[in-house]
Image (spheres, rainbow, N blue to C red):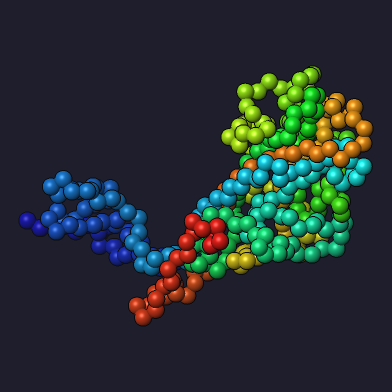
Amino acid sequence: MHRRITDEEKKTDVVDDDGDVEMTANKATTAKSGTLTKGMRHTQHGETPIDSYKYVVQRPFPLTTTVHMPFHYISAKDAYTIKPNSSTAALKANKITFRLNSIYDIYKSSNFAANDSDAAADTADASPNIEVPIWRKYWMDKYRMWTVIKSGWTFRIRKTDTPRANESMELFTYLHGREQPPTIVAGGTTPVTLDYRRMHHTLYDHGILKGRGTGDYAEVSKQDYNNNWSSGWDYQVSGNWEPGSIDHEVYEDEFMQTWHKATEVPPTPELVSFIIQKSMWDTYWASQSTGEETCEFQYEFIINYVVQLKDLVYIHQYVDEASDIAANADYASRANL
């Protein structure tokens, strides 16, 4: 007996904007079972079932795709230093800056422009000082243009030098565009003043990093903060970024741009800076005479970028049997990220 074919099953497949074949009836057939309707999972003699599906791929890669690209960095144990009692103001504090909207040159080590300077597009650091997330090389071999849709980040820091009784450090987080943090000067970073703590709308005061000695500000800990790399962190701060979440100066408007080439940074930067300095509650350094004694810190920065990619390269967009597709680079190698 023949079954009547429904109107739904008569519908033809439709090619969508990405060139994939949309299955309007979402059906599949097997040699023995006949037609499978939407949502059915059929097996023959204990075989692996057929999954339901939304569309059939026509080319290996769609014209647009959205992916995760993670980045994880742990510094050397003494990579981040300050001299709280230095005679040079720029050595009394320090900062680290990362790009939240760029998968190219993540760590911004270049000098900031002077405050209230003329508008200019942001540029990447000189090679080889370029940091990129995992999977970037793989995906940029397939697509020509990218943009970061959002990102989520975590920053951890710990003090790694000799404990001093009653010493105390403060960590500040500053979210900003091209305008540099208010404490950045030509020679380095000067301490955040009390006025900035009260007035600046994107400067956030965070937890205290306390010395591991004895005294009023000492902190009891089971960890070895001097030599043990696996010990815990003094402080952690996390955040999320998406377009529009950071305030910009009006003069930056002319450099707003969504899509970027493989080796470009966004002309308008979206940055997070971390500033470390002696805290107002410190009593150790306040009792010391001016000197060049150094405090050492180790930090960890983790960020996950959600990236959309467009402009599929020719060889993947128009697959030809006569043209060879080059093997992917070893994305496990840092040199090929």
Q: Which residue is drawn at 47% across and 65% down?
A: 329
Residue 19: quarter of image: bottom left
Decide which of 307, 333 is in the foreground and name it. 333
The C terminus, quarter of image:
bottom right
Q: Residue at x 67, y 31 (%)?
A: 225
Q: Is residue 149 left or right of residue 278?
A: left
Q: How many marks?
A: 0
Residue 129 image offset from top left, x and y in percent = 67, 60
Q: Which residue is drawn at 86% across and 52% down?
A: 187
Residue, far left = 1
In the picture shown, does residue 284 fall above or below 317?
above
- For the question of whether residue 192 can be seen, the reply is no
Q: Residue at x 90, y 44 (%)?
A: 89
Residue 313 image offset from top left, x and y in percent = 49, 72
The N terminus, quarter of image:
bottom left
Q: In this view, does 119 lie to the left or right of 15?
A: right
Decide which of 157, 123 is in the foreground and name it. 157
Q: Is residue 145 left or right of residue 194?
A: left
